[in-house]
Image: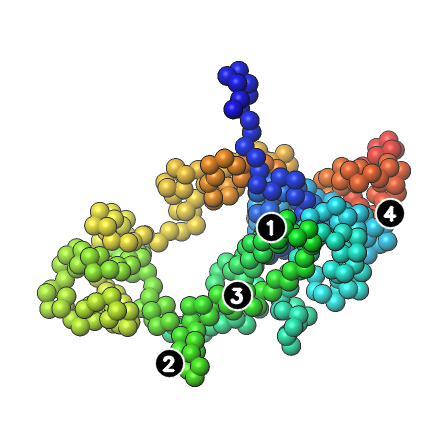
Amino acid sequence: MSGKNEPAQAAPRPLDGIRVVDMSTVLMGPLATQIFGDYGADVIKVEPPEGDVARHAGTCKVPAMGSMYLASGRNKRSIVLDVKAPQGKEALLDLCRNADVFIHNVRPEGMRRAGLDYEDLRAINPRLIYVALVGFGSGGCYANRPAFDDIIQGATGLAGLFFEQGLPQPIFVPWNAADRLTGTTAVHATLAALLLRARTGEGQFIEVPMFETVAQMVLGDHLGGLAYEPQVGPAGYSRLLSPGRKPYRTAEGFIVVTPYNDKQFSALFDLLEVPEATRQLPIFASLEVRQKNWPAIYELLSDAFLGKSAKDWAKLLNDAAIPSAAVSSITDLVADPHLEQVELFEISDHPTVGRIRQMRPTTTWSNADVSIWRHAPLIGEQSVEILQELGYEAEKIDAMLEAGITKTPDTHFVSKPT
């Protein structure tokens, strides 16, 4: 316990002392390493001279500093390395010699050709956790196929669920579901590998495939009768696939209402002034019966909320302890009073972009610093700093800058006047 006049000790960051070499691009890998950075790891983002293509995603106020990158690039340092050049590859290997984690999303044959597969890096650092993010697992016939979020949404049946629900055609979930699900899977796999290494002292190769990861999540809800051998019923979870499972239209806006138990259904019937004859319909008899009759229940409720606005219904339903929420727009969400009260959004001054809004890590900790503590860097913003940490002399760094093997935002030189 500190003395009365001593400054309070700063809360520790959970991954303080862990170094992550991040050679991933776009979103799946950068999201994973953003989370590592939020937890306090020293994440070194290795970029090609042109930078990560994801820097241009979303709204750009400053070139190569798009809105999505401002989030996924935070809590990291950026070094530019042309790993196709011998000196660039040498620097990458030097970074990995004392790293804890190396993560990439290059196709496996590309890493083998480059001499950067697991065995190559294990030879210089047996304790390294090597994380390969791939589209399809290496043991299957789709291995080495290119994969993007839309490809995986289609291949896993995620897009097709909307067609099975009754829409005219499959559609994509309008957020990067496959990238984000796979990125978060990579995080917990890597953390488990670090725990295992603490017990065994040995590194690990981890392959995290998009296709298998998302397929497992889709089938987790929709395996249905295929969970048994032989099959005992249709695939799919009928409640989720019911065409009526959608927000209800109101006099103004839409509302989501999800009564679940008997008490909530009774309260909803009271609120809607449902006639006794309707209440006694067999489809409402019990939770077990309702589970088999959701399409009919959705149909019965489809026009029940037209008499008031979504805002008015939300208050009435909340007062009656019936699970519900008005459907928010993206703009509504940013102004949501609950999110404001829990301080999800942080406004800060980025040294290049200016005032920006970000979302803090959503978990809260009693005695740990899990936060945004470093702004998203410019391309190569810490190139010189990181090379100096590796022990590179000024002349060597200058030669790499001059050859374009590395770069800084202004491509300044260390030992020569600018």
Which quadrant of the view contains residue 303? bottom left
**Between 94 and 312, which is closer to the camera in this rendering?**
94
With respect to residue 17, does 280 lie above or below?
below
Q: Secondary structure at mark 2?
A: loop
Q: CA distance from mark 2 to mark 3?
A: 23 Å
Disc on the earlier residue, 2 or 3: 3
Residue pushed farthest bottom? 230
Which residue corresponds to the image point at 56% horizontal and 54% vertical from the top-left?
A: 188
Which residue corresponds to the image point at 84% horizontal and 34% vertical from the top-left?
A: 414
Quarter of the image with the C terminus is top right
Eye-nearest disc, 4 or 2 = 2
Q: CA distance from mark 4 to mark 2?
A: 64 Å
Disc on the earlier residue, 1 or 2: 1
Question: What residue does disc 2 label?
Answer: 233
Residue type for callout 1: Leu
Q: Is residue 311 left or right of residue 353?
A: left
What label sits on residue 300 in the rendered view? Answer: none
Q: CA distance from mark 3 to mark 1?
A: 25 Å
Residue type for callout 4: Ala
